[in-house]
Amino acid sequence: MLRLPAVAGQFYPSNPAELTALIRDYTRAHPHQPPIPVRACLVPHAGYVYSGHVAGAVLARIALPRKIIILGVRHYPRGEPAAILSSGAWRTPLGDARIDEPLGEALKKACPLLSEDSVAHSTEHSLEVQLPFLQVLAPGFTFVPVALGTVQFESLVNVGEAIGRVLVTSKQNVLLLTTSDLNHYEDDTKTRVKDRKAIEQLLALQPRGLYDTCRNEEISMCGLGPAVVMLTALNALGVKKPELVKYATSAEVSGDRDAVVGYAGMIWHE
C-alpha cells in the first residue's frame, strides 16, 4: 500500500527544495548541542509556519535511530480507534518513507487492540507532517504509524504496556515519536496556564495524572491518548529523565492572542 500525501502544500511546502530548506532552518535551533539518544519525544503537528520551529528544536536534539514508532491522533471520526499500518510506504514531496513490517507485526502481536486500518490514516495530518523532518534528518529510516482516536484510559494503558514490552525486547533502538498540540482556541494567557499543568504531568511521567488533569481542567490537548500511551511505555522502560526543549503558542507567529494553540516540544532519555 502506498499512502499519498494529504496535506502537502497546506501544512508544509509541496516543493521539495523549499521543504528541505525550511526543515534545515527549523533544525538549526540548537547548533551547539550535539544530538543525544532518547527513548521518546513529543512534538506538535500544526502547520509548519506555526509549530515547525518547535518540532525542529526537538528533533535537532535527537540522535535519530533507524526505527521509529509514530503515535499520532485520529482527528476525524473514521476508521478504527487504534489504527496501525504494518506494511507499505507513505509518500511525501521528498520521496517514500517505508513502513517497518517486522516492527509493525510485533506491535500487533503484542497488542490486539491495534487494528490494521488504512481509513483512519488516509487524511490524518498529525503523522504525515513528521515524515519530511525524518526524511531530511534520518534518511533511510523506517517507521510504524499508529493513529489513536478517543479511547478509554484503560485501553490506552493496554497499548502503552504492549509497546513497552516490544521496546524492552527489541535488539535495535526504537524512538517513540509522539505528536500532540496542547490547549486549543482560548486566549494566550489562559492557554499558557493550562498548558503548564499538562506539561507538569508529562515531566512527571504520570499518565493517569495527565489524563485526569486534561479532563478536569478542560485542557483540549488533541494528543492526550498518544501521550498517555507514550508515558505508560516509558514507565515500563524505566525512563526517568524528561526535558522540556521548547514551548510556544501560535500567537508568537499570528499575533492573535485571543484564540491560540499551545505547542510543547519534549524529550525523555535514560
Image (cartoon, helix red, strand yellow):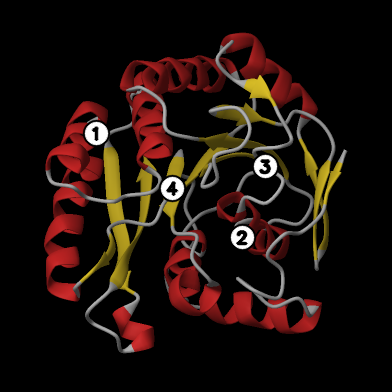
Mark 1 lies on a secondary structure that is helix
In the image, 205 versus 242, the foreground residue is: 205
Residue under pointer 4: 41
Q: Are marks 4 and 1 in contact (CB under 8 Å)?
A: no
Looking at the picture, how far across and down is residue 223, in whole percent? Answer: 40, 45
Residue under pointer 2: 129
Task: Please report whichever mark, 2 or 4, sits nearer to the chain's N-terminal start.
Answer: 4
Q: Nearer the viewer, mark 4 or mark 1?
A: 1
Task: Please report whichever mark, 3 or 2, sits nearer to the chain's N-terminal start.
Answer: 3
Q: Mark 3: which amino acid?
A: His
Q: Mark 2: which amino acid?
A: Val
Residue 23 quadrant: bottom right
Looking at the picture, how far across and down is residue 259, in whole percent? Answer: 27, 74
Residue 268 quadrant: top left
Q: Residues within 10 Å of mark 2 (few under 14, many from 20)?
A: many
Task: Please report whichever mark, 4 or 1, sits nearer to the chain's N-terminal start.
Answer: 4
Q: Residue at x 35, y 32 (%)?
A: 228
Residue under pointer 3: 121
Q: Nearer the viewer, mark 2 or mark 4?
A: 2
Residue 101 marker = none
Q: CA distance from mark 2 to mark 4?
A: 15 Å
Image position of 10 (left or right of 212): right
In the image, 18 versus 218, the foreground residue is: 218
Q: Vertical placement of 15 versus 66: above or below?
A: below
Q: Mark 1: which amino acid?
A: Tyr
Mark 2 lies on a secondary structure that is loop
